[in-house]
Image (cartoon, rainbow, N blue to C red):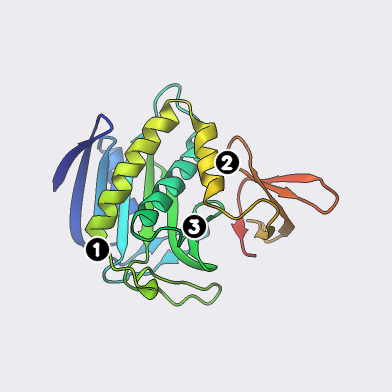
Amino acid sequence: MVVDRCAGAVLTVRVTAETGSTNADLLVAADAGAEEGLWLRADRQIAGRGRIGRSWADGAGNLFASTIVRLRPGDPSAPTLTLVAAVALAEAVGAVAPGLATIKWPNDLLIDGAKLSGILLERGAGNAVVIGFGVNLASHPQLPDRATTSLADHGVAVAPAVMLDLLRDRFAAGLARWRGGDLHGIRMAWEGMAHPRGTPLRVRLPDGGEREGGFGGLGDDGALRLIGRDGAVTMVHAGDVCG
């Protein structure tokens, strides 16, 4: 276990050799009273999961880590933490691989269109939010519906512990910025690391339907703004960008 201080907060990192899911473990810990700033990293994660019920495959040398945020009165809405998490991870990856990865809404990182990482936010009991990060550092899974990649595929070697150090420092700074009322600045940082405005996107919705349009930036709550050919704006709050 490692205890450190960053941005005025105590950050505790626990490391385990193997677990089913770091998110599941921290949801239990949060329910038992674990404080904000606790991180859990696993060398192997055998029952990880991603957004929309997808599994997240184990891979030796990759990063599997989660942390706890305790919502406070006056905090911005909890879903906007996804922007904080995405920006922090993009900055951490950018520290070892400048200009290589871009953000895909809502919080995946891509390299040349292939998925490098994923982020999953889950609500716990009371005021707890658990945020999980999976990053393909040394290897990547083969998925039937999308291209995947790893930093090693692009000649970048980084250990999970090093990547977590980069991530937790940037996440702590982003969380302080979020609580300080600079959600607009966080959105602008997100957009600066994402697809350019006007990029054609196709979004698969949770009900199985699809929407198409040009990327029009983010709404105040982090929703995706899709601009149709007629100029009409559609706000998408949940879905999967697939093209």
Outermost residue to the front: 98
**As displayed, is residue 116 above or below residue 84?**
below
- Seen at 29% across and 50% down, the residue is 166
* Circle 1 or circle 3, nearest the eye: 1
Disc 1 to disc 3: CB gap under 8 Å: no
Say whether residue 144 is left or right of residue 44. Answer: right
* Circle 2 or circle 1, nearest the eye: 1
Say whether residue 108 is left or right of residue 197. Answer: left
Question: Of the residues shown, which amino acid type is indicated by label 1?
Answer: Ala
Kindly identify which residue carries mark 2.
222
Tell me the CA gap for discs 1 and 3.
20 Å
Residue 235, position in %: x, y? 69, 44
Pointer 2 local density, CA inside 10 Å: few below 14, some 14–19, many at least 20? many
The answer to whether residue 125 is visible is no
Pointer 1 local density, CA inside 10 Å: few below 14, some 14–19, many at least 20? few
Q: Earlier in the sequence, mark 2 or mark 1?
A: 1
Question: Of the residues shown, which amino acid type is indicated by label 3?
Answer: Asp
Secondary structure found at label 3? strand
Kindly identify which residue carries mark 1.
159
Q: Earlier in the sequence, mark 1 or mark 3?
A: 3
Kindly identify which residue carries mark 3.
108
| Along the viewing direction, whichever of 157 and 19 lies nearer the viewer | 157
Residue 88, position in %: x, y? 40, 46
Pointer 3 local density, CA inside 10 Å: few below 14, some 14–19, many at least 20? many
